[in-house]
């Protein structure tokens, strides 16, 4: 292999991963407004029926964050009035559950 070819290979090995990270970051970055709108839409579609528009029903805002995340991901068994479905099986991750819990808390504080 000639030195010129070796240089091209080395540049490709270093440049391509950096380029891939840069292009991925640009397409997947969301501003705070986009993220908030997504959370609001998710909450309205999946949570509001049981927890109310202000998150003031069947939601204990004083629970530890780890417990809230666990409940959102795993759900709760058939408690009265209804069982809480788990969203992990539907593709939700722990960081997304944490954001949802934070959003629900914000509904409570904005209502007060």
Image: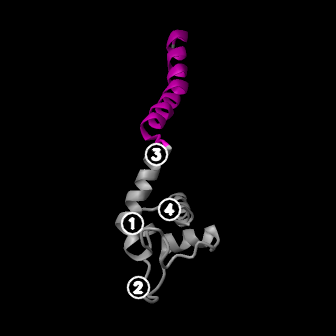
- N-terminal of the pair, mark 3 or mark 2, is 3
Q: CA distance from mark 3 to mark 2?
A: 32 Å
- N-terminal of the pair, mark 4 or mark 2, is 2
- Secondary element under disc 3, as helix, strand or loop, is helix
Q: Name the residue rendered at 42%, 68% in the picture.
A: 53
- Mark 2: few, some, or many residues within 10 Å (few <14, many ≥20)? few
Q: Which residue is mark 1?
A: 90
Q: CA distance from mark 4 to mark 1?
A: 15 Å
Q: CA distance from mark 4 to mark 2?
A: 20 Å
Badge nearest the viewer, 3 or 2: 3
Horizontal side, residue 1 vs residue 81: left or right? right
- Could you tell me if the residues under marks 4 and 1 are in contact, i.e. CB atoms within 8 Å? no
- Mark 1: few, some, or many residues within 10 Å (few <14, many ≥20)? few
Badge nearest the viewer, 4 or 1: 4
Q: CA distance from mark 1 to mark 2?
A: 19 Å
- Tell me residue 31's x, y (percent): 48, 41
Q: Is residue 97 above or below residue 25?
A: below
Dominant secondary structure of the magenta stretch? helix
Residue 33: assigned label: 3
Q: Is residue 45 above or below residue 2?
A: below
- N-terminal of the pair, mark 3 or mark 1, is 3
Q: Which residue is mark 4?
A: 100
Magenta stretch?
2-31
Q: Name the residue rendered at 57%, 71% in the picture.
A: 68
Badge nearest the viewer, 1 or 2: 2
Residue 27: assigned label: none
Q: Which residue is mark 2?
A: 82
Badge nearest the viewer, 3 or 1: 3
In the picture, the quarter occupied by the C terminus is bottom right
Q: Is residue 96 above or below residue 74?
A: above
Q: Residue furthest left?
A: 45
Q: Is residue 107 magenta?
A: no
């Amino acid at each position: 292999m000639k030195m010129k070819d070796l240089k091209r290979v080395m540049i490709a090995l270093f440049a391509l991963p950096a380029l891939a990270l840069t292009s991925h970051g640009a397409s997947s970055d969301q501003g705070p407004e986009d993220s908030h709108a997504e959370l609001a839409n998710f909450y309205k579609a999946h949570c509001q029926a049981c927890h109310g528009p202000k998150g003031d029903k069947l939601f204990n805002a004083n629970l530890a964050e780890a417990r809230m995340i666990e409940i959102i991901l795993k759900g709760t068994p058939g408690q009265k009035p209804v069982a809480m479905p788990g969203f992990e099986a539907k593709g939700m991750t722990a960081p997304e559950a944490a954001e949802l819990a934070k959003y629900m808390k914000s509904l409570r504080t904005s209502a007060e």
